[in-house]
Amino acid sequence: MKPYWSDNLYLELDITNLSCFYERAKKDLTDINKYFGITPATERAALTEVVAGRRKSEARINFEERCFLTKITFPEVIGYLEMQKTRVKDIEAAIDTHFDLVKREILKSYSDKLYRAMRNDQADARRAAGGNQTERGATTKNSKTKRKGGGTADEEAVMSNAIKEQLSGDPDLQFENPYVCTYSKKLSQLYEYEEQLLRVDRTQKSNRRGLQTICRMQGSLSQSYFLWDAQKYKIARKVYYELENQEKELEEDNWSEVN
């Protein structure tokens, strides 16, 4: 994928639409695999053509029967499945690109919140202990020196270490762990920090004019795009018509039984 080019559709979507695209793309891939009886364990057996004279697996037999009922060729289905896999991966690549831009802002936001909370706790402790007791007890020049945040050098160092420790153990900040920082979680954080993402985009060195180059497409775009996919591959339409025929046959059978 080309980063931040206008012909990159997924990078152009705002976070709300990108999230809708992602959920819809995953569901489409799951549903079409389910319809053709394909699972991760049976995918290779179902989609690999069997040489004449060799015994076909049950997964391959079921797959061929589904193709026959829906009047779809094997290459059509395989091509459609590959397109859907590529679509999911491309959306995930766009999520990663956005997330790499904004994760420093996320860390800074969490760090600032912890710092403010600790400063407030220190202020409450001083008030409870009688105001200036901590400052009177300081013995070294360093410890008496006030920092910008209002605390002594020793206090600032202790807080800095405490903040680093808390940040390292926060599950929301395990960016390098794909089992914790899933794409759904990344999207949730991107939605929360979308304003910061756009600000970082406008202030990049490569963006000399300071213009917004990402997330420019808003509104209900998902439906029209997925309809375009259906027009191109015509798989979903054929599956729908086959399901409709099955319902009609079932209704006819039920009517004949009643009469």
Image (cartoon, helix red, strand yellow):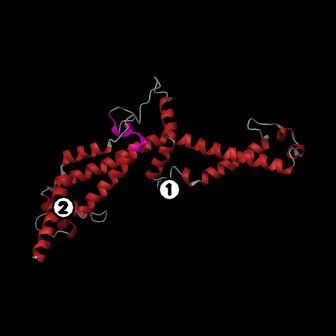
Q: Position of residue 53 (x, y in %)?
A: 11, 68
Q: Is residue 65 visible?
A: no
State the residue at coordinates (34%, 54%). 26
Query: Where residue 8 appears, x then y in whole percent?
Result: 34, 36
Out of 135 and 45, give the one closest to the viewer. 135
Q: Is residue 14 magenta?
A: yes
What quarter of the picture does the N terminus occupy? top left
Q: CA distance from mark 1 to mark 2?
A: 38 Å
Q: Is residue 73 visible?
A: yes
**Crowd band around label 2 with a 10 angstrom C-alpha radius: few (<14), some (14–19), many (20+):** some
Label 1: state its secondary structure: loop
Q: Does label 1 or label 2 sit earlier along the sequence?
A: 1
Labels 1, 2: front one: 2
Mark 1 and mark 2 residues within 8 Å of each other at the beta carbon: no
Total tally of numbered discs in the picture: 2
Indicate the quadrant containing the C terminus: top left, top right, bottom left or bottom right.
bottom left
Q: Which mark is residue 243?
A: 2
The circle on residue 180 is 1
Point out the stretch of residues depicted in magenta.
7-16
Q: Is residue 209 above or below residue 248?
A: above
Give the dominant element type of the magenta stretch: helix, strand or loop: helix
Q: Is residue 148 above or below residue 251?
A: above
Residue type at mark 1 is Val
Which residue is pictured at 64% across the width and 42% down the height?
112
Q: Amino acid at mark 2?
A: Leu
